[in-house]
Image (cartoon, rainbow, N blue to C red):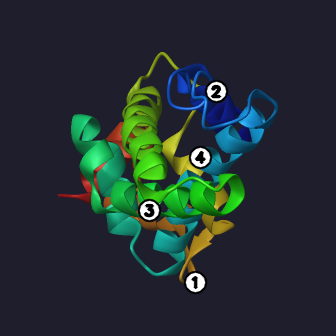
């Protein structure tokens, strides 16, 4: 999953990172890694903090994923990392984060919800970012309870989570 996320960021880094003169070309991969880490670290932090509803909600809100509270946290973490690692001022770093993170999240959520695209799976994402559990709860067990024990696919599971 991490490799798929890094590739997704690379594919969409264009003007934000790759063609940005504020980020030296030889450090493009580092900047892509920082964006990916900001996304994963925020997801891990949300789950560790017991906010699995926020994580699942982001993946079920589709087009609004880039404006979710988690997206704001991801952008904030990415801005801090860009300022620390690349010496960018806050306006430059915020511009990069505001252009890149919502775009990535929109595609990340779309791919996760697309039954014809198996590059990302919500259950797999939740298990990986939580180490298989959330606050002592097994994510698979939690999701299956909200799906009444049926194996109707991840979207049915997620929909059941909110019913």
Estimate the spatial distance between the alpha carbons at disc 3 and disc 4, rounded to whole Å.
Answer: 11 Å
Q: How many numbered circles are shown?
A: 4
Estimate the spatial distance between the alpha carbons at disc 1 and disc 3, rounded to whole Å.
Answer: 28 Å
At numbered mark 1, what does the secondary structure look like: helix, strand or loop?
Answer: loop
Q: Earlier in the sequence, mark 4 or mark 1?
A: 4
Residue 50 x/y as whole percent: 43, 79
Q: Earlier in the sequence, mark 2 or mark 1?
A: 2
At numbered mark 2, what does the secondary structure look like: helix, strand or loop?
Answer: helix
State which mark lies toward you, 1 or 3.
3
| Residue 37 image-quadrant placement | bottom right
Q: Is residue 82 above or below residue 3?
A: below
State which mark lies toward you, 4 or 1.
4
Please name whichever residue, 106 or 149, is drawn nearer the observer in this view of the structure: 106
The numbered disc on residue 76 is 3
> On the rendered structure, is 86 left or right of 46?
right
Estimate the spatial distance between the alpha carbons at disc 2 and disc 1, rounded to whole Å.
Answer: 34 Å
Q: Earlier in the sequence, mark 1 or mark 3?
A: 3
> On the rendered structure, is 131 left or right of 72?
right
Please name whichever residue, 148 or 92, is drawn nearer the observer in this view of the structure: 92
Quick check: marks 4 and 1 in contact, CB under 8 Å?
A: no
> On the rendered structure, is 15 left or right of 70?
right
According to the picture, the residue beneath numbered tag 1 turns out to be 136
According to the picture, the residue beneath numbered tag 4 turns out to be 35
Q: Earlier in the sequence, mark 3 or mark 4?
A: 4
The numbered disc on residue 10 is 2
> On the rendered structure, is 14 left or right of 87?
left
Estimate the spatial distance between the alpha carbons at disc 3 and disc 2, rounded to whole Å.
Answer: 20 Å
Q: Which class describes the residues within 10 Å of circle 4: few (<14), some (14-19), or many (20+)?
A: many
Q: Earlier in the sequence, mark 3 or mark 2?
A: 2
């Amino acid at each position: 999953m991490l490799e798929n996320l890094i590739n997704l960021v690379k594919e969409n880094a264009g003007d934000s990172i790759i063609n940005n003169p504020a980020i030296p070309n030889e450090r493009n991969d580092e900047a892509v890694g920082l964006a990916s880490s900001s996304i994963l670290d925020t997801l891990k932090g949300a789950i560790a903090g017991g906010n699995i509803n926020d994580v699942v909600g982001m993946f079920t809100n589709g087009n609004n994923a880039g404006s979710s509270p988690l997206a704001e946290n991801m952008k904030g973490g990415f801005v801090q990392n860009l300022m620390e690692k690349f010496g960018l001022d806050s306006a430059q770093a915020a511009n990069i984060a505001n252009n890149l993170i919502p775009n990535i999240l929109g595609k990340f959520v779309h791919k996760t919800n697309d039954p014809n695209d198996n590059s990302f799976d919500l259950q797999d994402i939740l298990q990986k970012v939580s180490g298989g559990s959330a606050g002592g709860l097994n994510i698979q067990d939690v999701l299956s309870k909200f799906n009444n024990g049926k194996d109707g696919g991840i979207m049915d599971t997620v929909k059941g989570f909110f019913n």
